[in-house]
Amino acid sequence: MNDKQKTVVITGASNGIGRALAGKLLSEGFKVIAVVRSGAIEGLSHANLTIVQGDISSIISISHAIEKIAAMGVEVDYLINNAGVGPDLMEDVPTAEHMQTSFAINTTGTVLFTEGLLKYVKNGGHILFLSTAMALLRNAAPSGPAYRMSKAAINMYAVMLAQRLAEKDIVVTPLHPGWVQTRMGGQNAPVTITQSVDGIYKALTENKTSGKFWNIEVDGLQDF
Ligand SMILES: NC(=O)c1ccc[n+]([C@@H]2O[C@H](COP(=O)([O-])OP(=O)(O)OC[C@H]3O[C@@H](n4cnc5c(N)ncnc54)[C@H](OP(=O)(O)O)[C@@H]3O)[C@@H](O)[C@H]2O)c1
């Protein structure tokens, strides 16, 4: 193995942005550890791809996934927290079910997975959160209440984590991937998966400013 090869862990890589990003990273020579709830990624295989079964809504499944990654003896250069759901994007009224699902995956599971993996992230590494511009206070609107609130919480966590990890030189970036043509974004979205993935790749490899919000639609950092 090339010892200069970077290792990236990505959650929710079975579909949409996560799957395409895993493919892009493999084509760029990264070692990719993909955490996927089904345990498989249809149509994607590569010598540098390891798939780890993991459901980000389950605390037990998260710890099993972390144990499996730890057993590989790898040091992680990049962690991409991509797994996410938006069950109420077309709704204005929060329900118990939508709140529980959104927070379990977009917030609690994402935070616990990150905390579990932290000790394997290299000094000088980069942790990225697939957030959304919908979660910025100045973009508040009635739609997607559970989704917006769960992602707003992750923006806050990202800034707090950036401060905690500053002395390890680990960059933390909450990011808006654009409104993207995926299962979540729908086919009328203006941004293709390829455009989104290229923007995320740029943020991942070029952004050195920790705790700030990156928006691929402005091709750089913007205020929260
Ligand atoms: N598309 C957009 O316009 C847009 C805009 C802003 C932010 N984002 C964010 O970008 C990220 C990716 O979204 P996408 O558009 O690619 O959506 P997507 O096509 O629906 O893909 C979501 C991915 O997350 C995985 N996932 C969901 N729940 C999971 C769980 N409990 N455990 C593990 N994996 C889980 C899904 O796995 P399964 O295949 O097993 O369901 C799937 O691979 C999300 O965090 C989303 O909030 C998207």
Image (tube, grey):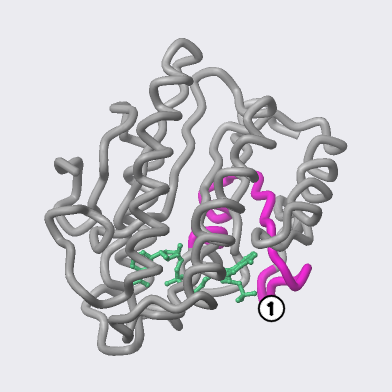
Q: Is residue 173 above or below residue 190?
A: above
**In screen coordinates, is 120 left or right of 205?**
right
Q: Quadrant of residue 77?
A: top right
Sort mark 1 into few (<14), some (14-19) or many (20+) by Cα contacts within 10 Å: few
Q: Give the magenta-colored segment's residue range.
A: 21-44
Q: Quadrant of residue 119?
A: top right
Which is more toward the observer, 70 or 111? 111
At 73% from the left and 52% from the top, the residue drawn is 59
Residue 202 percent coordinates (x, y): 33, 45
At 50% from the left and 53% from the top, the residue drawn is 107
Q: Is residue 14 above or below residue 166?
A: below
**In screen coordinates, is 113 left or right of 59?**
left
At 52% from the left and 47% from the top, the residue drawn is 80
Q: Label 1, on which residue?
A: 42
At 33% from the left and 43% from the top, the residue drawn is 203
Residue 84 percent coordinates (x, y): 50, 65
Q: Is residue 78 magenta?
A: no
